[in-house]
Image (cartoon, rainbow, N blue to C red):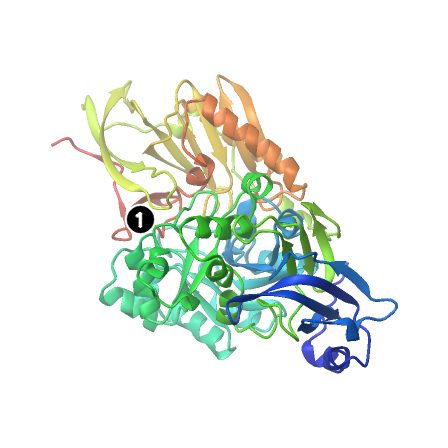
Amino acid sequence: MEYTPFPSWPDVAPRLIAVAAGREPADTVIRGGVWVNVHSRETLADHDIAIAAGRVAFVGADASHCIGPDTQIIEASGRYMLPGLCDAHMHIESGMLTPAEFARAVIPHGTTSMFTDPHEIANVLGLDGVRMMRDEALMQPVNIFTQMPSCAPSAPGLETTGYEITPEDVAEAMNWPGIIGLGEMMNFPGVIHGDPKMLAEIAATQRAGKTVGGHYASPDLGPEFAAYVAGGPADDHEGTCEADAIARVRQGMRSMMRLGSAWYDVESQITAVTEKGLDSRNFILCTDDCHSGTLVNEGHMNRVVRHAIACGCDPLVALQMATINTATHFGLEREIGSITPGRRADVILSSDLTELPIELVVARGQVVAENGSISVDCPHLNWPDTARSTVHLGHALTDTDFEIKAPAGANRVQANVIGVVENQAPTKALKSELPIIGGLVEGEGDVCQIALVERHRATGGVTNAFVSGFGYQGKMAMASTVAHDSHHMIVVGTDREQMALAANRLAEVGGGITLFRDGKELALVELPIAGLMSDSPAADVAAKADKMVEAMQACGCQLNNAYMQHSLLALVVIPELRISDLGLVDVRTFEKIDLLEPLA
């Protein structure tokens, strides 16, 4: 299926004007609702919306002059008419779904616009992967805007990706339809120190008049933060406390507050608005990462807005943070984000502004979902074989690939250990005294092994280390080809034989997530596209993901959304300690460190 561009305002302006004036009939009129106006921050009862050519032509107390014999009438029956919700920062691949299936999952939740950064697939397939994601995104009945990934690798010199993104790639992509800006600039040390490559990417984006996304994952709000802001990023979603949100807004950035499957950063930051009284127009809500289980069982941006309201935010302010604030930030205020003339007709009907039940969804003037059921097709791209064969180990792995040899003559040793923090992206840099058995260092208590298995170039490389916080018990291992951001394979386990079984299984199925215990596979989520996504329906993927959660719990893990924590253990741009194909990385200093240290 070829992409058909949505008609621009100049293409349809004569029709919109004629419908608003009553000279031509509207395609659709939504009648008798409460107009939620995010420009004026007010609700206006007994209003109508007239829609033509997929856009709003008229909003007022009486649209009867816009109604003709063939005009579709939708009775709002006193319900709230609010703009379709916008997700300002997200990664479709984190839902383990293709753009088509992600759209199918979130449309019934009222999300009609998404700003996506496909840097996950960029690490695996490079610019071709970005183009595929963009192509399928443009085929959808809702608005999916693509940010060109900026950092693959995210931390040059500390990891090896399948492909690298260059300033030339960025400059090329800025000319593509559907590219809205530059994805999150994760290499914040590079910006701070004036790295020519990073600055060239930012310059190419700004020359194109597009938005530069930020990612400042550091608690330092002094000169280094100021240097990062001076480098050009216009927003940031890595804040975790009120001071972070305030600092970003004061320096002219938009503070993006996220509630994803594992990130709970809204409550700790929204007090900058609800208690400190800062201008709410500079705050934006987003998800960042939502897996399929969250989408199916809890919702998407409607979940984020409800949460913000529960945290004390005025419902209209929360809605602004998920609609007009986002549109304005990306230069799309004349296209999306409000129910006003000329804008795309993205409208939700809801009977309650606090609980936000999504009862009817209109996107581009078309009814796309009602009472939780989608009513439109979400077309699929014909993904090529190159996107479906991306797990290359070099050789079948055995338990010896996961051995950590001890220093000669030692009985115990001190190890640097990655400490998982529930519901947060950062980890802790821990130290643990571990036993030596048969010349090999072994995990003990809550400390188990973690390995990063190279899967892009078939080098056969395996980096071994230790992690704590999962609570695993018995002989088990969990492996995943979703390993932000380089997306090699991460294996966490208490037994080396199980680790080898799990890794080889993912090579067999072309990528995904698996969990083995005592030689048996307890759960498997196949992700055949780039080892990151499935083109199966979200409900099917979510059901398999639920079995994965059950399997993790059966092995002793009680962490909330532990899979998301697992997938981030190689993210070498978020402190404190991470694993990469090049070794153990201290992200506080952006230096590789030794796994083992002599006991004091």
Q: Look at 26% across and 51% down and name the residue there.
A: 588
Which residue appears at 24% of the width and 22% of the height? 435
Q: Pick the residue in front: 382 or 342.
A: 342
Q: Position of residue 571 (x, y in %)?
A: 39, 47
Task: Residue 416 in the image: state x and y as whole percent.
Answer: 25, 36
Q: Residue furthest right?
A: 69
Residue located 31% across and 69% down the image: 250
Residue 236 found in image quarter: bottom left
Q: Residue 40 at what x, y percent from top left?
A: 51, 71
154 up-or-down from 560: above or below? below
Q: Amino acid at mark 1?
A: Pro
Q: Nearer the viewer, residue 396 or 264?
A: 264
Q: How many marks?
A: 1
Instruction: Look at the picture and state if 589 lies above or below 24.
Output: above
In the image, residue 557 above or below residue 588: above
Q: Quadrant of residue 81?
A: bottom right
- Which residue: 56% across, 60% down? 127
Q: Can residue 66 be seen in the rendering of this structure?
A: yes
Q: Residues within 10 Å of mark 1 (few under 14, many from 20)?
A: many
* Front residue (pair 385, 189): 189
Q: Mark 1 — residue?
A: 575
Regarding mark 1 in the picture, which secondary structure is present there?
loop
Left or right side of 153 for 37: right
